[in-house]
Image: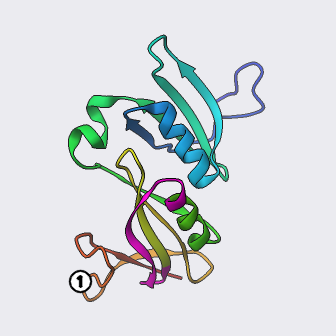
Amino acid sequence: MSASAGESGPIKTSIAPWLSVRRGAEAVDFYKAAFGAVELHRVENDAGEIVAQLSIGGAKFWVSDEPDSSPEALGRGTARMILTVEDPDSVFEQAVSAGATVVAEVYEDFGWRVGRIADPSGHHWEVGRPLTEGHATIAPNPSGVCSCPDSASMRFVLRS
């Protein structure tokens, strides 16, 4: 792969979530208030619908007005965001203050300090951090039973 004119090098492979929402501009405002997101790119049509690229501490994602495929239209989300931060308690409280709904308070289990919120568009976010440092590998929870407040979802244990 070679860089095109004006680029400093090859494009780095990455994955960036694309969140479908109703009221995109309001969603962008929420992410800025809740997580300190920075708007990197925005396109808006005459109807006020947007496509925006945001960054939270360098982690990039997209938001767009797609009301027919938003969690509000579907009745539930189809993916969950995991936001890993240094201070999950602070970020969790900031998100709740900005309008998020608490799904599970911050707790410690399976090597993580984590809490779960739903944003105003219906997307679920787990805000947390691993309790141990180093390279983590994923292994199934050996008991097969989730003791986390959200027992409907299967947890995995991160081990160093």
Residue 140, image quadrant: bottom left
Q: Residue at x 62, y 44 (%)?
A: 55
Residue 89, image quadrant: bottom right
Front in this rendered view, residue 103 or 98: 98
Give the residues in magenta.
96-112
Q: Amino acid at mark 1?
A: Gly
Is residue 14 visible to the viewer in this orientation of the structure? no
Q: Is residue 29 above or below residue 87?
A: above
Q: Residue at x 54, y 31 (%)?
A: 52
Q: Is 98 a magenta residue? A: yes
Judging by the rendered image, the residue that carries numbered circle 1 is 144
| The C terminus lies in quadrant | bottom right
Is residue 5 visible to the viewer in this orientation of the structure? yes
Front in this rendered view, residue 135 or 48: 48
**Image location of residue 51, percent across then percent down:** 50, 27
Q: Seen in the image, is 147 located left or right of residue 137?
A: left
Q: Seen in the image, is 3 located left or right of residue 146?
A: right
Q: Is residue 86 above or below residue 6?
A: below
Q: Is 106 a magenta residue? A: yes
Q: Residue at x 47, y 53 (%)?
A: 99
| The N terminus lies in quadrant | top right
Residue 39, image quadrant: top right
SS of the residue under disc 1: loop
**Image location of residue 33, percent across then percent down:** 60, 49
Q: Is residue 56 above or below residue 46?
A: below
**Image location of residue 48, percent across then percent down:** 48, 19
Q: Rate crowding at label 1 as few (under 14), some (14 to 19) or many (20 or more) other CA atoms within 10 Å.
A: few
